[in-house]
Image (cartoon, helix red, strand yellow):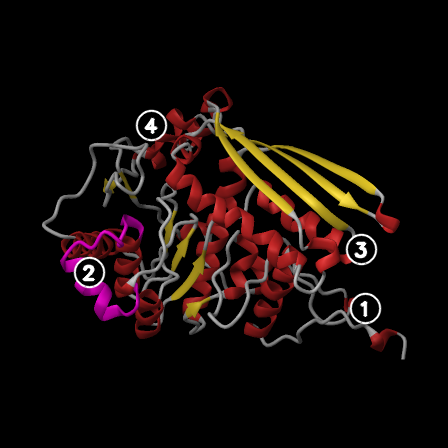
Amino acid sequence: MGTIRLGKRTEGRSPRIKDFVPLAGLNDIVFGGWDIFEEDCYAAARTAGVLEPAQLDQVRGELEAIRPMPAVFDQRYVKRLQGPNVKKGNNKRELAEQVIADIRAFKARHGCDRLVMVWTGSTEVYMKETAVHASLAAFEQGLERSDDAIPSSMVYAYAALREGIPFANAAPNLTADIPAMLELAARTGSPLAGNDMKTGQTLIKTIIAPGLKARLLGVRGWYSTNILGNRDGEVLDDPESFKTKEESKKSALDYIFQPHLYPDLYKDLCHVVRINYYPPRGDNKEGWDNIDLIGWLGYPMQLKINFLCRDSILAAPIVLDSALFLDLAKRAGLSGIQEWLSFYYKAPMHAPELYPEHDLFIQLMKLKNTLRHLQGEELITHLGREYYD
């Protein structure tokens, strides 16, 4: 999380964020969850091959103690996966009640004071809002009849929000950003964040694109391709799941460049996104970007980026950050969409009348100013005239 500057630059106050705001201590956190596979977390981590065995063995006992609860799962929404550890029920309302029972049992078993839920499941097929999402009443009727427009992720979100638990969507699928969930979050005072953790190629885009726009360098084209071989890559090999991810990854540049304000520079931008499943690469994702630029007097230039990254290594810390900040938000009396957490997401949740903010640096300023506000510190605008007047 780094540090946060407080007051004027001359004051020299830059505490660590974890020391500035009352976050839950790592030793006070208990982990649990659901999965369609029955293996404990140690066995699952060995299979994933992200961390070295010597590192996993240091926490083997703790990981083996975490066994997944049976999951809500329907292969119609994630077509490349199947597993045996799946809940059964007469309808989706029954499945939601089973998740709620799991939540209550987990809380009692571990003596937890508070809970946070983060959806880190696989990307579901592309979906748009329908009538069943328009209100909480319509959604609950849809649960009763197992409406096809309610995927598994929405069942989890509903269960969490019913219990007043903060919820984050770390995937790109349509989950909590529907009127029904916003209504339920308001009723139970639950904070919301999402969507789609910003870890690899889109993280780089939201770093590079604001710089190009700040210098008014035109962009004719931005070609992005990825190879990865983990389960995420396998799921995204299905065209319907890829469509969900594509929509999430492509939106950032449109909002950063604002082609309606700078048509000569960005109106005809050709933005292409590709993801290829390549099993030999495992969790070590590789992203290539080719950016065709236009400089002064129309002279063409190019920028090429090759990011050899590790998907889970980038994602795990910000999943934890999101959980800690959502818990803080709940204790601070904040509910509904937490736009100040957009720093972590590719497709940030936002109020319907607003456009989403994708610029990483503006997002970071919003996050830190929110923390300053919560702690009664002066907000920082970087105007700085007081040093010179």
Q: Quadrant of the C terminus?
A: bottom right
Q: Residue furthest top?
A: 280
Q: Amino acid at mark 2?
A: Gly
Q: Identity of the amino acid at label 1?
A: Thr
Mark 4 secondary-structure assignment? helix
Residue 215: assigned label: 3
Whole-Å distance between the Cαs marked 3 and 4? 50 Å
Q: Position of residue 111 (x, y in %)?
A: 27, 56
Extent of the magenta region: 133-153
Q: Is residue 308 left or right of residue 315?
A: right
Q: CA distance from mark 1 to mark 3?
A: 29 Å
Q: Secondary structure at mark 1?
A: helix
Label 3 or label 2, whichever comes before in sequence order:
2
What residue is shown at x 19% (from left), y 60% (from top)? Answer: 142
Three-letter amino acid code at disc 4? Ala
Return the disc, 1 or 4, that comes first in the chain's sequence: 1
Residue behind mark 4: 43
Residue 231, percent from left and from top: 40, 31
